[in-house]
Image: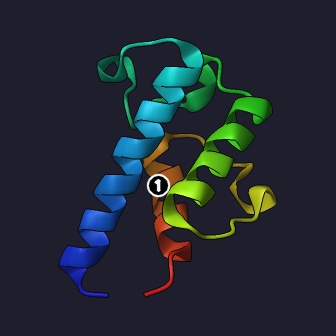
Amino acid sequence: MTDIDTSALHARITKFVVERAAYYLDLPDATVDVDRPLGDYGVDSVYLLSIVTDLEEELDIELDPQQLADVRTVRELAGKVAAEVPE
């Protein structure tokens, strides 16, 4: 994947995670800061697992929730997920 493709994928995943987090938390998308800890918004392991499941469906990939359990921000989650998407 080229840098442009990787950057576009990261942006797509970031946008998707923001939308899903906002949906589950009943917040406007614009209020979800990609660098703020997800826990500050009330995202717990159940919400995170729901977002990961949504990502798997959206990207047609399998993710290991255990490897993503320690992410703190949307940006970090998007980066880890983008690294798992096959080229």
Image quarter where the N terminus lies is bottom left
- Nearer the observer, 25 or 36: 25
Residue drawn at point x = 50 percent, y = 64 percent: 59
- Nearer the observer, 8 or 58: 58
- Nearer the observer, 16 or 83: 16
Task: Report the residue marked by disc 1.
Answer: 78
Residue drawn at point x = 23 percent, y = 80 percent: 3
The reply to whether residue 71 is in sight is: no
Q: Quadrant of residue 19?
A: top left
Q: Is residue 43 above or below residue 28?
A: below
Label 1 CA crowd tier, 10 Å (few <14, some 14–19, many 20+): many
- Nearer the observer, 37 or 16: 16
Q: Position of residue 27 (x, y in %)?
A: 45, 12
Q: Is residue 78 above or below residue 41?
A: below
Residue drawn at point x = 50 percent, y = 33 percent: 20
Residue drawn at point x = 46 percent, y = 55 percent: 78
Q: Position of residue 6 (x, y in %)?
A: 31, 74
Left/right placement of residue 12 relative to residue 23 reads: left
Image quarter where the C terminus lies is bottom left
Q: Is residue 30 above or below residue 37?
A: above
Left/right placement of residue 68 relative to residue 35 reads: right
The reply to whether residue 63 is in sight is: yes
Instruction: Please state which amino acid type lies under the numbered disc 1.
Output: Ala
Element carrying mark 1? helix
Residue lying at the far left of the rendered structure: 4
Q: Quadrant of residue 46?
A: top right
